[in-house]
Image (cartoon, rainbow, N blue to C red):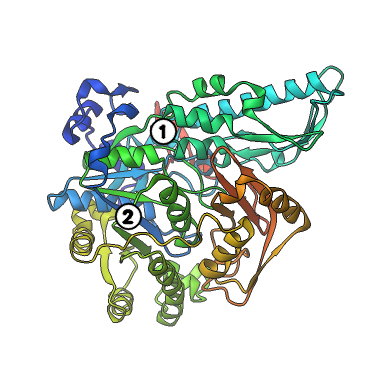
Amino acid sequence: MKSDIQIARETPLKKVKEIAERIGIERDAIHNYGPYMAKVPLRLKKEEKIDRSNLVLVTAITPTKAGIGKTTVSIGLALGLNRIGKKAIVALREPSLGPVFGMKGGAAGGGYAQVLPMENINLHFTGDFHAVTSAHNTISALLDNYIYRVQGTPREIKEVLWKRVLDVNDRSLRYIVTGLGPGNGVPLESGFDITAASELMAILCLAEDEQDLRRRIDNILLGYTREDKPFTVKDLGVAGAITVLMKDAIHPNLVQTTENTAAFVHGGPFANIAHGCNSVSATKMAMSYGDYVITEAGFGADLGAEKFFNIKCRKSGLQPKLTVIVVTAQGLKMHGGTPEKAIRQPDMAGLVKGLENLSKHLENLAAFGQTVVVAFNRYGFDTDDEIGTVAEFCRQRGIRFAVNNAFTEGGKGAVELANAVVDAIENEPSQPLRFTYPDDDSIRTKIEKVALNVYGARDVVFSEKALRRLNRIEQSPLSAFPVCIAKTQFSFSADPNEYGVARDFRFKINDIVINQGAEFIVAIAGEMMRMPGLPADPQARRIDLVDGKVEGLS
């Protein structure tokens, strides 16, 4: 089969103005970034149509390094729905350059289910990540300048919480010292996070409009004064300047799929170190023009889906009609104890054992009130017996099941899944969302409810550092915020090597980060790093420019 980039390059693209017209947006209302990408102004959202649209979340079992194919299934489902006569639009996150050149590679789908132009989307796209990076680091520079100017006065900052960000994987920047040398500022211990973990990225994805963006930026907590008073961007007096840097980034990006259907790709927080969902504005824009909108949440249902429900939907009022959970035979076998090097070989015992992981995710999704369709993302080496075993597992539990072949067949290969989705929405739509915790629970209780009820932990242990920050939060209005737990994506626990379903484990919270502008509290579990490192053999070794064309992107 051809590579992703070959398929992308051979796909005839429609001008983005034509893509806009096809879904009901006037061609001259969008702002072009070249012939195939555009920004769609927020004013084009149609609130009266949003409630009538069918929102479908795509999530997955706990992922493995072999991948699950959630983005490919999301795009494929949108293609399949269009094939059966439904007006469907996919709404996804933007790729981050760090993983593109690191371990994961690109994030624009795969095979015959991609969003295009994939080279642009995987690299600089419309500049949203650069805008977030510039805005974040401008705050850092302005804060350091303030600290330098007020040192030794009552306005001095005692504790600085704000770091810097870059859209690269660079472990050497996790812990640094700034301000060294005469006249270069005040020496401070600091560090870099990846741009996807920036609070400004979360704000971009949760803000409803420019005014909400500005309000949230004003509220960003930067540190505490000598008198232990919160110090925010509003105190720095620069929210207007930062909003200006993000004034274009807040508008959703319109592109197309391999079958020339519409796709909104906007925002890019990771689900392991942030809330893992595309922007509210892009989702609502898609719902303004599509009868079915397919969106995904990062990694497994314990991370992305939990945050999609408890953070994104809670804050935006969105109500998904259905959740699709993606499984692969490889993933199930790895969770069932099959060695990684053997997961492409038949191992029915490993696959059956791995179904425990799917079962736990189904239990969690039911607790949210979700009707679920299981999508088996088929690879060429999967056997009919493996597919039949998963299908029977679902049949016995009254859960709809479909095989997805969109990677090799495009929309044609997702018709079975599309029909299952339509049948579920028409005959058994999800109930109104049931959140894991109410707003008035304490932050500690919220963390404990997620850890015990979603992950299956025995109890939660907090470090002294985390407890100090919790005590500070509980004495403020911040305790009404939802929680965003940063943990490994490879396990229900905080141990990335604990596959399957972790049981009877203690869940340790090492630190608490206050995202006052994004309006959620981040609890960092285990050894989770907010700046990833590069693997021994990074994807960058395979990417090149040959005769003016990008090679090696996937």
- Choose top left, top right, bottom left or bottom right for residue 395: bottom left
Q: Which amino acid, mark 1?
A: Val
Looking at the image, the residue that sits furthest to the left is 85
> Pointer 1: residues within 10 angstroms few (<14), some, or many (20+)?
few
Residue 157 is situated, as x and y percent measured from the top left of the image, at 78, 30
The span from disc 1 to disc 2 (Cα, nearest Å) is 38 Å
> Pointer 2: residues within 10 angstroms few (<14), some, or many (20+)?
many
Residue found at x 48% / y 76%:
336
> Where the C terminus falls, by quadrant?
top left
Q: Circle 2 — which element?
A: loop
- Vertical relation: 474 (above or below) 30: below
Q: Is residue 27 visible?
A: yes
Residue 27 is situated, as x and y percent measured from the top left of the image, at 21, 24
- What residue would you read off at disc 2? 320
Q: Circle 1 — which element?
A: strand
- Which of discs 1 and 2 lies nearer the camera? The answer is 2
Q: Is residue 223 left or right of residue 379?
A: right
* Circle nearer the N terminus (1, 2): 2
- What residue would you read off at disc 1? 550
- Choose top left, top right, bottom left or bottom right for residue 20: top left
Give whichever of 257, 505 is nearer the camera.
505
Residue found at x 23% / y 20%:
28
Q: Is residue 261 visible?
A: no
Give whichever of 439, 360 is nearer the camera.
439
Q: Is residue 94 left or right of residue 25?
A: right
- Vertical relation: 270 (above or below) 226: below
Q: Which amino acid, mark 2?
A: Pro
Q: Are marks 1 and 2 in contact (CB under 8 Å)?
A: no
Residue 478 is situated, as x and y percent measured from the top left of the image, at 61, 46
